[in-house]
Amino acid sequence: RHKIVEAGALPGLVALLQSCDKDASLEASAVLAHLASDAALGAAIVKAGALPALVAVMQSGEPMATTDAASAICSLAAEPTLRKAVVEAGAVPQLVRIMKDGSDEAKAEAACALCQISSSDKSLSKRCVASGALMPLFALLQRSQKKNKPDGASSSRSDTHSDPRPGEISQTASSARPVNDGNSSMEPSLGPF
């Protein structure tokens, strides 16, 4: 991964993301998702201008590219110093849209990214809430609870009260990846939610 970045591939990958060639954009989003999974490369990826291009890919609605772009955003948001840049690039509204309309895998990546973004900064958390992130996260939690409930099993809580408890949200939304809140702990969290 580092050799790819050291060879100067990032500007070309960003250009491919912005390409009208859907296959090239799909491949570039997959490569950037792979590169972004290495925390040491996050700043270089952001500096190369990948964030606005990744947000544009998420807007495209192409399922595989959207999933890869959301995965890359989630990985970048794992680094506390990059979270503000992720938000300023316009990622939050697209992540919320993916939580509503995306594939299950894309929803998991989007939920992870939203949890990462909101985990350590109250102002970023408020922006997630203002963009409508809570209801899709609640819906994901409820779907997850239904999937994990054995047939015929009754809920430990009243069936008439289905609002999730705060800790349940972060456990479900963070199941794809741990949340790095900037501290030494990697516990799942929704921060100030």
Image (tube, rainbow, N blue to C red):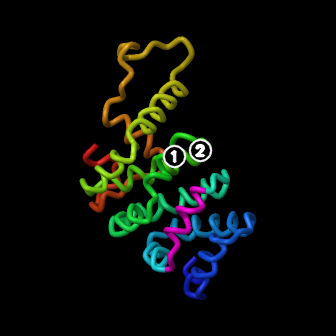
Which of the two discs, 2 and 1, sits closer to the camera? 1
Please give the name of the residue rendered at 54% of the width and 19% of the height, measured from the top-left corner: 150
Which residue is nearer to you in this view: 112 or 62?
A: 62
Q: Nearer the viewer, residue 101 or 1?
A: 101
Among numbered discs 2 and 1, the one appearing first in the sequence = 1
What is the spatial separation of the Cα atoms under label 2 and label 1, in whole angstroms?
8 Å
Location of the C terminus (image quadrant): top left
Task: Indicate yes or no whether the magenta region holds residue 50.
Answer: yes
Q: Position of residue 98 (x, y in %)?
A: 54, 47
Above or below residue 71? Residue 131 is above
**Mark 2 and mark 1 residues within 8 Å of each other at the beta carbon:** yes
> In the picture provided, is 21 more to the left or to the right than 13?
right
Q: Position of residue 70 (x, y in %)?
A: 54, 56
Disc 1 packing (10 Å; few <14; some 14–19; many ≥20): many
What residue lies at 70% left-to-right and 67% top-to-bottom?
A: 27
Horizontally, is 187 left or right of 63 in the view? left
Residue pointed to by mark 2: 102
**What span is in magenta?**
48-59
Q: Which residue is mark 1?
A: 97
Q: Looking at the rendering, which quadrant does residue 4 occupy?
A: bottom right
Q: Main secondary structure of the magenta part?
A: helix
Q: Residue at x 38, y 68 (%)?
A: 85
